[in-house]
Image (spheres, rainbow, N blue to C red):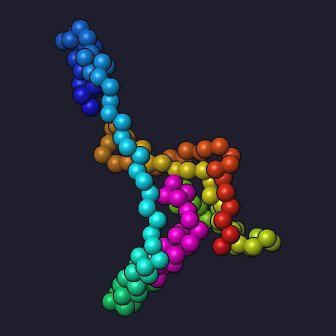
């Protein structure tokens, strides 16, 4: 952000140099993913069950659907980007080799410069990143 401000000041001839360009940006540490334990998965499933019991009839279907989606996503080991990019055309229920879900690369969320919202766009890695997960 500071770099953008200083760059605008240089364009208006308010500064001769951009001192921000001389500073190295700190690198963000890579996040370590933590896999849920069997006990944590059971607690999530129990929480879905309790939520379904407490929900009104019209909401119960949505809670049950969320429970199934959680179980499928976790059971298949889908990555966050694969889940964001998942479309019905990637689900093959009538495949002769058995039902599968095809992970198509990765989808990443990028901030937009002109708005507060984020947009999601496909980012395809190498073909080897495309994988098929049996259901």
The residue under the point 51% across, 54% down is 81
Across and down, in percent, residue 59 comes to: 39, 83
Quadrant of the image occupied by residue 39: bottom left
Q: Nearer the viewer, residue 20 or 24?
A: 24
Across and down, in percent, residue 88 comes to: 61, 65
Q: Nearer the viewer, residue 133 or 88?
A: 133
The residue under the point 31% across, 19% down is 21
Relative side of 68 to 53, left or right:
right
> In the figure, 134 relative to 13: above or below?
below
Q: Quadrant of the C terminus?
A: bottom right
Span of residues in magenta: 63-82
Q: Is residue 84 visible?
A: no
Q: Is residue 67 magenta?
A: yes
The residue under the point 60% across, 45% down is 124
Total marks placed:
0
Relative side of 1 to 92, left or right:
left
Q: Is residue 87 visible?
A: yes
Across and down, in percent, residue 48 comes to: 40, 82
Relative side of 16 to 133, left or right:
left
Across and down, in percent, residue 100 comes to: 69, 68
Relative side of 61 to 10, left or right:
right
């Amino acid at each position: 952000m500071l770099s953008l401000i200083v760059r605008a000041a240089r364009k208006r001839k308010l500064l001769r140099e951009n001192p921000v360009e001389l500073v190295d940006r700190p690198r963000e540490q890579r996040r370590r993913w933590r896999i849920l334990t069997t006990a944590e998965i059971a607690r999530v499933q129990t929480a879905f069950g309790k939520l379904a019991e407490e929900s009104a009839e019209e909401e119960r279907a949505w809670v049950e659907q969320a429970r199934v989606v959680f179980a499928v996503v976790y059971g298949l080991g889908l990555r966050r980007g694969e889940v964001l990019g998942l479309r019905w055309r990637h689900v093959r229920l009538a495949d002769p080799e058995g039902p599968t879900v095809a992970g198509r690369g990765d989808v990443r969320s990028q901030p937009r410069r002109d708005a507060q919202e984020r947009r999601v766009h496909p980012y395809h890695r190498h073909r080897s990143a495309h994988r098929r997960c049996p259901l």
